[in-house]
Image: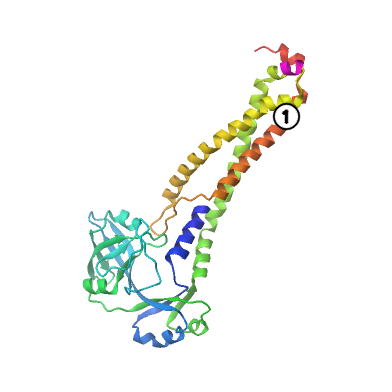
Amino acid sequence: MNSINGMLDRAFKETVHYDVEIKLRTPATVEGLADIYNTLSSGQHVDATMALSVYLYGKEGDVQSSYLVVMDEGQKSLNFKDTKGKEIPLPEEGALITPRMAKALAVDIGDTLRAESLDGTVMALKVADIVDFPVGNEIYLSKTAFAKVSALPFLVRTLLIQGQDLDLSKLNSDPRISLVETKEEMRNNMLIVLESLQSFQMILILFAGLLAFAVMMVLGRMNYYERIRELATLKVLGFYENEMKRLVLRETIWITVFGLPFGYILGSLLLGVILDQATTPDLEILPMIELSSIAVGFAFMLGFTMLVNFMMGRQFKKVDMVASLKSVE
């Protein structure tokens, strides 16, 4: 759950800087959208983008279906960063691709891809850089770079607007517009998609807790019954009940304390394996465990240990000294 929330924060706080997305029903020229630009004049910045559906072919014949997104070099809507976290602008030559696309096509920086649009137009795209883009698997070109590889005109398909409290009522009824969506609505829509996954996670957490309690209970009972002769001997020698508890049950607490770091390490490795399998071409979730989650997990384990110790401690009153000392080892 921390990893999913971290992915959404990366996407909508670090990468996506626009506040509203407007999608057109059919592509149009910038001049033909002058009235829409006037309506959005109160916004801080407006970026026009063009998107083409293309098939990408790697060096070894690998094929991927994606969208080729063309934007102005000075765009402010998307904050591109390479895999080392360094901010990079849209290059004047070549395309930006995600690590997932680079892996699927077996290409690296400097390699050339062949892009084929649905109308049969073929373009040679050089990989200028690989950008850390957690959501989506599009490839990005600047207008200048696109003009060097294609003779197609730039037609606007989507408008990305920066600005709060915009009056979008007129745009909702515009027949040229198919969708007006805020960044918050996009995030909520993604959460709805991931809701079933979060429900599954809650089930995993519940059963993990039950399993942890069952294991602690079994270990506690084994420790008690295997040492019942020792407990009877201590009782005969005059040890008080609380002293016997400190001698025997304290071991369970120390075992739990020493085991917690190993549980964290193994749990982190398991999380990495699970999220690696869950990564799709359109979504990348990196492992992330917050300190609060670690503290809650440790607190639950210590709580289970104390509960087991309390339940087993009540058994000390029932120790039959004669029967226990006569038992065959």
Return the residue nearer the eye: 4 or 237: 237
Horizontal and vertical percent position of residue 96: 31, 64
Instruction: Give the residue displayed 40% in from the left and 55% down from the top.
Output: 280
Horizontal and vertical percent position of residue 55: 29, 64
- Give the side of residue 9 with respect to residue 132, left or right: right
Instruction: Give the residue displayed 58% in from the left and 35% down from the top.
Output: 257
Rendered position, 91 above or below 25: above
> Number of numbered discs present?
1
> Mark 1 is on which residue type?
Gly
Return the residue nearer the eye: 79 or 25: 79
Rendered position, 164 above or below 130: below
Horizontal and vertical percent position of residue 47: 38, 76
Q: Secondary structure at mark 1?
A: helix
- Give the side of residue 80 with respect to residue 316, left or right: left
- Give the side of residue 236 with respect to residue 134, left or right: right
Location of the C terminus (image quadrant)? top right
- Give the side of residue 147 with respect to residue 301, left or right: left
Residue 104, picture quadrant: bottom left
Rendered position, 134 above or below 32: above
Q: Is residue 259 magenta?
A: no
Q: Main secondary structure of the magenta part?
A: helix
Q: Which residue is mark 1?
A: 313
Residue 321, picture quadrant: top right
Density class for disc 1 (Cα within 10 Å; few <14, some 14-19, many ≥20) is many
Magenta segment, which residues? 232-237
Q: Is residue 236 magenta?
A: yes
Horizontal and vertical percent position of residue 32: 36, 86
Instruction: Give the residue displayed 30% in from the left and 71% down from the top.
Output: 142
The image's colouring method is rainbow
Instruction: Give the residue displayed 58% in from the left and 44% down from the top.
Output: 297
